[in-house]
Image (spheres, rainbow, N blue to C red):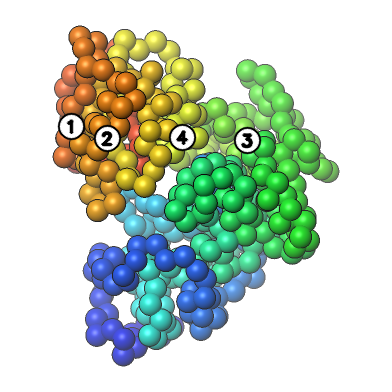
């Protein structure tokens, strides 16, 4: 490993992970720079390849849950599992896990230095650079299986320089319209870009876009659709999965809460069915994995009073699911919302699903230039018809931490606080809670 070598394009080779991340954040002109040519060149220089099955997961929502369930089940089955997921909440190390444990700083720094040496004068975004580093890092770990979560779209996402043995698209809805298009058909085509000729392609969206189906057929992928090639049924106690060649009965419900988790779990079991000869997994291992799976920030209900719900819902599809999940909870006298969002999101669409569920809005700025200001969110809420009266209020704050502190000071023990709108909103509250307990 050329860990101590850097090219002439950089006079700096940080020795600490935090310094590397600061450098990468400042270096490339664009935060998002769609296209694979630059990433593919560096990947080839690094010689990244895998000697084990690779599962890739894309989708508008549900990617993180699907990856977490895959990891939990495969770990229960005794396999050595590598996972790349994003974004992180508190520590960058969350993005790469080996056997469920985040990778340490030293291994990141060594691999960052290797990517730096390989890239020469090729400019890479923060996401492209760190993706290459993590893919290289995982390729060196003698793993039994690698799970890779796509960042944005699929076809032009940096993760897509890796060829997946099984590619999953969880859901297709309107998000990132500036990059992916403004219809489900356009977005479906972008997400189908992770499919490969002759390999298994899975879509767990009950209404898969025709563009996704057509692309899979055009390249000769082995497409498996929810409702046609796999399905589920169940009652309040247990559920059953049916695939092309495999049934799994009397399954425990995933420990992840939420209305769409059985769709995600079905995609997971369809993927494991496709890999059953390379990675056999028993019935008990599936049951235990589903019960053990844990994923912060996805309809995460914290213990104690008042009830606190953390959910990264940041687009209308996710907000609709969050609203449905809130309806399925027990009675709460008042609901306080800690809400922050990126400016490029469909803020009006998110509010439309949530406005009937919230009594008191605590809206906040977020620590990124492309975030919507609290003033902007206040305007959007007013346009949506959110009123202030004896039973309803709207307060603006400079951070999620401040908004959460205010909500906590006002909420009674029979109330609930819902934190949503962005990973950064949830991360801010997580950080506040961690600081309060330390």
Residue of label 3: 263
Element class at badge 1: strand
Residue 307 in which image quadrant: top left
Residue at x-position 57% and y-position 61%: 155
Element class at badge 3: helix
Residue of label 1: 396
Residue 16 in which image quadrant: bottom left
> Does the image show residue 207?
yes
> Does the image show residue 101?
no
Element class at badge 4: helix
Sequence-wise first label, 1 or 2: 2
Q: CA distance from mark 4 to mark 1?
A: 22 Å
Residue of label 2: 377
Of circles 3 and 4, the one toward us is: 4
Q: Position of residue 336 (x, y in %)?
A: 28, 22
31 in relation to 28, above or below: above
Sequence-wise first label, 3 or 1: 3
Residue positioned most to the right: 245
Of 285 and 108, which appears nearest the observer?
A: 108
326 in relation to 350, above or below: above
Residue 316 badge? 4
Q: CA distance from mark 3 to mark 4?
A: 18 Å
Residue 117 in which image quadrant: bottom left
């Amino acid at each position: 490993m050329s860990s101590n070598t850097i090219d002439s394009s950089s006079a700096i080779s940080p020795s600490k992970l935090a310094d590397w991340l600061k450098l990468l954040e400042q270096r490339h002109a664009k935060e998002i720079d769609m296209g694979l040519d630059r990433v593919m060149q560096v990947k080839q220089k690094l010689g990244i390849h895998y000697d084990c099955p690779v599962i890739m997961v894309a989708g508008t929502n549900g990617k993180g849950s699907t990856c977490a369930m895959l990891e939990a089940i495969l770990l229960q089955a005794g396999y050595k599992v590598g996972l790349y997921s994003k974004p992180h909440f508190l520590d960058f190390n969350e993005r790469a896990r080996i056997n469920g444990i985040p990778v340490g700083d030293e291994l990141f720094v060594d691999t960052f230095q290797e990517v730096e040496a390989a890239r020469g004068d090729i400019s890479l975004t923060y996401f492209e650079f760190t993706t290459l580093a993590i893919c290289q890092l995982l390729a060196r770990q003698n793993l039994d299986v690698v799970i890779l979560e796509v960042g944005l779209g699929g076809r032009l996402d940096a993760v897509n320089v890796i060829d997946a043995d099984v590619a999953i698209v969880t859901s297709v809805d309107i998000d990132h319209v500036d990059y992916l298009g403004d219809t489900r058909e356009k977005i479906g085509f972008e997400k189908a870009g992770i499919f490969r000729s002759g390999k298994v392609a899975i879509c767990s969206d009950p209404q898969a876009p025709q563009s996704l189906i057509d692309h899979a057929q055009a390249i000769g992928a082995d497409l498996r659709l929810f409702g046609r090639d796999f399905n589920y049924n169940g009652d309040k106690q247990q559920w059953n999965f049916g695939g092309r060649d495999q049934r799994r009965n009397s399954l425990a419900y995933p420990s992840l809460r939420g209305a769409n988790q059985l769709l995600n779990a079905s995609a997971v079991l369809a993927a494991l069915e496709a890999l059953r000869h390379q990675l056999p997994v028993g019935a008990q291992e599936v049951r235990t994995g589903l019960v053990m799976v844990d994923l912060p920030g996805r309809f995460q209900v914290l213990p104690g009073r008042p009830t606190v719900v953390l959910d990264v819902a940041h687009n209308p599809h996710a907000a609709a699911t969050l609203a449905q999940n809130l309806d399925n909870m027990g009675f709460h006298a008042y609901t306080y919302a800690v809400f922050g969002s990126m400016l490029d999101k469909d803020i009006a669409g998110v509010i439309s699903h949530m406005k009937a569920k919230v009594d008191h809005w605590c809206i906040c700025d977020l620590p990124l230039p492309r975030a919507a200001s609290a003033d902007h969110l206040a305007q959007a809420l007013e346009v949506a018809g959110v009123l202030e009266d004896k039973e309803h209020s709207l307060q603006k704050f400079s951070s999620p931490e401040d908004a959460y502190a205010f909500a906590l000071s006002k909420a009674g023990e029979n109330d609930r606080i819902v934190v949503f709108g962005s990973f950064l909103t949830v991360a801010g509250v997580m950080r506040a809670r961690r600081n309060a307990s330390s």
